[in-house]
């Protein structure tokens, strides 16, 4: 279960990433952020974001036209 | 912030040379995203990119000489012939249309992206020579920027992992 949820639905590149970074900044290490996005580009972008920042992408799923990401803060 | 929030030690610099509504996007998108990915980012604003540091932004664009710009319109993609682009009011219309398109597609405004850049400690350098050349005033520009020249940029570039010219 996520500790915090970020609704980035309707936002386009690069806003989901920028808002996710802002949310993660305020969280403690080990906590999980769930991001909800409608931007298809965010699938590749959150993988890249996590590989670059060392935060762990626990899951990347699609529900209808919503993309869901669980990110564990490093 | 030298070592960032996630301990990423990489860095990026961008030379920003264009200040039209459309061309203002690539440097601010890449700058804010790199900062979000914890890179140390420097943006050097020169020539027509320099007005992007003015407090009050009034960005415009032109369709003139841009055959690749095909706007979605009534289910088609329409490019503007140059002879039409040159007519009075066409640039204003294209600017309004583009701004509406950004809003409809959930794309941030340049004002918002610049704000995000400031918030994430992106280092912004205004080109002193351009400031003199176009008789612009530092007082009209946002707070937190620095003034510098080519040598300042080169110094940054030699220490950056990524250097872009846009």
Image: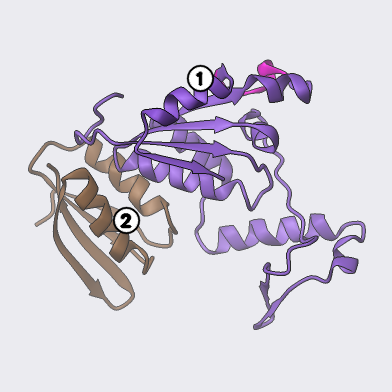
Chain colours: A brown, B purple
**x, y percent for residue A45:** 31, 58
Residue B143 colored in magenta in the image: yes
Q: Nearer the viewer, residue B90 or B163?
A: B163
Residue at 66 percent across and 49 percent down: it is: B21
Q: Is residue B10 left or right of residue B123?
A: left
Q: Is residue B99 visible?
A: yes
**Residue at the disc numbered 1:** B144
Q: Which residues are magenta?
A: B137-146
Q: Quadrant of the N terminus of chain B?
A: top left
**x, y percent for residue A57:** 15, 56
Residue at 48 percent across and 43 percent down: it is: B164
Please state which of the two labelled residues, at mark 1 or mark 2, is closer to the viewer: 1
Is mark 1 in CB contact (under 8 Å) with mark 2?
A: no
Q: Secondary structure at mark 1?
A: loop
Dominant SS in magenta: loop
**Residue at the disc numbered 2:** A7
């Amino acid at each position: 279960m996520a500790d915090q949820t970020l609704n980035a639905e309707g936002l386009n590149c690069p806003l989901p990433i920028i808002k996710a970074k802002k949310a993660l900044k305020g969280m403690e290490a080990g906590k999980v952020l769930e991001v909800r996005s409608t931007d298809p580009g965010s699938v590749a972008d959150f993988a890249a974001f996590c590989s670059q920042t060392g935060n762990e992408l626990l899951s990347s799923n699609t529900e209808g036209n919503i993309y869901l990401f669980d990110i564990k803060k490093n | 912030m030298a070592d960032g929030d996630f301990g990423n030690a990489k860095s990026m610099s961008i030379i920003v040379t264009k200040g039209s509504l459309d061309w203002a996007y690539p440097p601010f998108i890449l700058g804010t995203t790199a900062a979000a990915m914890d890179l140390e980012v420097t943006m050097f604003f020169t020539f027509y990119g320099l007005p992007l540091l003015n407090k009050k932004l009034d960005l415009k664009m032109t369709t003139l000489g841009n055959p690749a710009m095909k706007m979605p319109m009534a289910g088609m993609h329409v490019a503007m012939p140059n002879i039409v682009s040159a007519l009075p009011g066409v640039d204003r219309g294209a600017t309004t249309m583009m701004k509406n398109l950004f809003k409809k597609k959930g794309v941030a405004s340049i004002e918002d992206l610049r704000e995000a850049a400031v918030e994430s400690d992106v280092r912004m350098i205004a080109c002193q020579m351009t400031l003199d050349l176009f008789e612009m005033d530092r007082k009209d520009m946002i707070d937190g920027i620095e003034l510098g020249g080519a040598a300042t940029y080169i110094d940054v570039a030699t220490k950056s992992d990524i250097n872009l010219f846009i």
